Amino acid sequence: MLSSLLVESSVDLSFKQLLVCIVTSVLLGLLVACVHMYRNVYSKNFVITLAVLPVLVQLVIMLVNGNLGTGVAVLGAFSLIRFRSVAGGAREITSIFWSMGIGLATGMGYVGYIALFSMIIALFLLLLNTIHFGEKQKVAEREVKITIPEDLDYPGLFDDLFQEYTYSANLDSVKTTNMGSLYELRYRITLKDSQMEKELMDAMRVRNGNLTIVSGKVSTNREEL
């Protein structure tokens, strides 16, 4: 079942073998697209690309007569162009490599092999997303901007609060605002419990004279990988 459908030379490829490989690529490409759409933010164009990519990769492999090295070199060039032009997340990159792997396998004739492994990968990914594997339930990273009057000595001003409510707190930047009458402090903190965020902000408001405090998520582009 896991052996190749094709003979050593793809010149003698029959229409039936070609049809089996194409149908397998199409069905497994749709499987990749469906798994990627499960509890994930996506665009229509991207999931269509995932569904079509295995057939395109299979075409390239068959055109080079099953020469895996040449096929991978050609596809690698196209994948580099894609990755350099659009910044993708870890899950997008995983789906792209999965689709390319399907095309490589069907292009070499290993239909049973890739069908079995695709089902295993699909079930594994669905399981991980269903059980929320890797998600931080209580611990949360935040970017906090605190405005204080110029007469406050900011070094160590909130250290006791950070020690009580956070695992870590780093002062990233300090800048003056409102013609130098105010300071804006930017901290990156890791909360011990996200439910205590309001309590921490209330405590900081007492220290900074009820001036503006902004707490938000850390930019996602630094945590894709």
Image: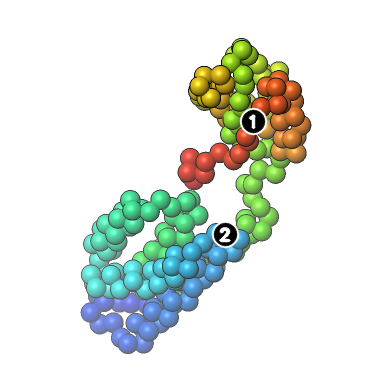
Dot 1 lies on which element? loop
Q: Position of residue 3 (x, y in %)?
A: 41, 72
Report the side of 210 relative to 145 (left or right): right
Q: Position of residue 201 (x, y in %)?
A: 71, 30
Quarter where residue 46 is shown:
bottom left
Q: Earlier in the sequence, mark 2 or mark 1?
A: 2
Residue at point 62%, 19% (across, down): 149
**Residue 8 in view:** no
Report the side of 27 relative to 197 (left or right): left
Residue at point 24%, 73% (across, down): 63
Tell which residue pokes out farthest to the front in this image: 179
Looking at the rendered structure, the kind of residue marked 1 is Thr
Q: Which residue is label 2 attached to? A: 40
Q: Which residue is label 1 attached to? A: 212
Q: Nearer the viewer, residue 109 or 212?
A: 212
Q: Position of residue 223 (x, y in %)?
A: 51, 42
Looking at the rendered structure, the kind of residue marked 2 is Asn
- Which dot marks residue 142? none
**Dot 2 alpha-carbon crowd within 10 angstroms: few under 14, some 14 to 19, many 20 or more:** few
Dot 2 lies on which element? loop
Tell which residue pokes out farthest to the bottom in this image: 15
**Residue 22 in view:** yes
Give the CA separation, mark 2 to mark 1: 34 Å
Report the side of 211 relative to 65 (left or right): right
Between marks 2 and 1 in the image, the one whose residue lies nearer the viewer: 1
Q: Position of residue 78 (x, y in %)?
A: 29, 59
Q: Nearer the viewer, residue 126 or 165?
A: 165
